[in-house]
């Protein structure tokens, strides 16, 4: 009878999530492989077996964040109305950030000051924004949005959602604010600004 595999995908995900939480709450100095292994109830050997060391673990954290983000954005059901689809993508952007705030900070801040993504990691991050670009392009080509460079619409839409989500995650919104409602209102106002009149 073969021995059960202990260094499996579930352990890999637990290690990544714990490492992300340590980094986002306590900073880069808090992340040691020994502490990470102890927190997850495994050995440093398991960490090395799964990731090969700390630099590879940090890279995998960055990539994992964008993989999850991309999967959620790709799962947005399209309605046939690209303007509405852009709003839906914006809502899922926020949901993704709230589901994995520990990865969001690694994806979009310098919580890893010495980390520089390699070409494959950059390709993963770029792929995560393609659902946004595709919907914007569809809206322009179908005549729903005004004739504007798709990159302009995509980057300004991203800036809006990123700014609002960052304020929310950092606790910088007014107390008692209907965040979800205000967020959706902002998404719809952004879309109205690009509509062809």
Image (cartoon, grey):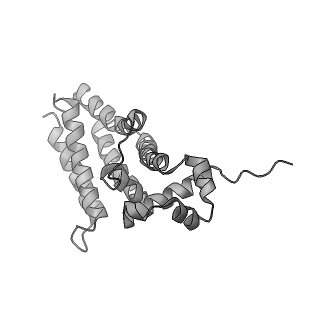
In front of the other: 123 or 76: 123
Left or right: 2, with 139 as reference point: right
Q: Position of residue 24 (x, y in %)?
A: 38, 62
Note whether 125 is above or below 162 in the view shown: above
Q: Say whether residue 144 is visible.
A: no
Relative to residue 60, is residue 24 depicted above or below?
below
Quadrant for residue 142, please give it.
top left
Residue 122 percent location from the top left of the image = 37, 37
Position of the C terminus, as image quadrant, is top left
Depth check: give the residue in front, 193 or 8: 8
In the rendered structure, the answer to whether residue 32 lies left or right of residue 150 reads right
Quick one: 137 or 82, which is closer to the camera? 137
Can you say whether 143 is above or below 87 in the image? Answer: above
Residue at 54% x, 63% y is: 34
Q: Residue at x 66, y 51 (%)?
A: 7
- Furthest residue toward bottom: 175
Q: Position of residue 86 (x, y in %)?
A: 30, 42
Residue appearing at x 50%, y 61% in the figure: 18
Q: Determine whether, in the image, residue 25 is placed left or right of residue 154.
A: right
Residue 21, given in percent of the width and then of the height, sits at 44, 62
Q: Closer to the camera, 162 or 73?
A: 162
Please state the total of marks drawn on the protein image.
Answer: 0
Q: Is residue 7 visible?
A: yes
Residue extending farthest right = 1
Residue at x-position 16% and y-position 30%: 148
In the figure, residue 97 lies in which quadrant? bottom left
Furthest residue toward top: 141
């Amino acid at each position: 009878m073969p021995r059960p595999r202990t260094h499996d995908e579930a352990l890999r995900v637990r290690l990544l999530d714990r490492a992300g939480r340590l980094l986002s709450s306590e900073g880069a100095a808090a992340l040691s492989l020994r502490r990470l292994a102890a927190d997850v109830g495994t050995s440093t050997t398991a960490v090395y077996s799964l990731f090969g060391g700390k630099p590879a673990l940090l890279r995998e954290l960055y990539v994992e964040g964008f993989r999850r983000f991309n999967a959620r954005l790709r799962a947005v059901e399209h309605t046939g109305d690209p303007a509405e689809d852009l709003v839906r993508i914006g809502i899922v952007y926020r949901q993704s950030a709230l589901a994995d705030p520990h990865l969001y900070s690694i994806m979009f801040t310098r919580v890893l000051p010495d980390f520089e993504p390699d070409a494959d990691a950059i390709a993963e991050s770029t792929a995560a924004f393609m659902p946004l670009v595709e919907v914007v392009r569809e809206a322009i080509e179908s005549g729903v949005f005004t004739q504007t460079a798709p990159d302009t619409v995509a980057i300004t839409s991203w800036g809006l959602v990123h700014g609002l989500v960052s304020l929310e995650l950092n606790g910088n919104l007014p107390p008692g604010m209907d965040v979800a409602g205000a967020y959706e209102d902002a998404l719809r106002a952004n879309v109205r600004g690009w509509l062809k009149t």
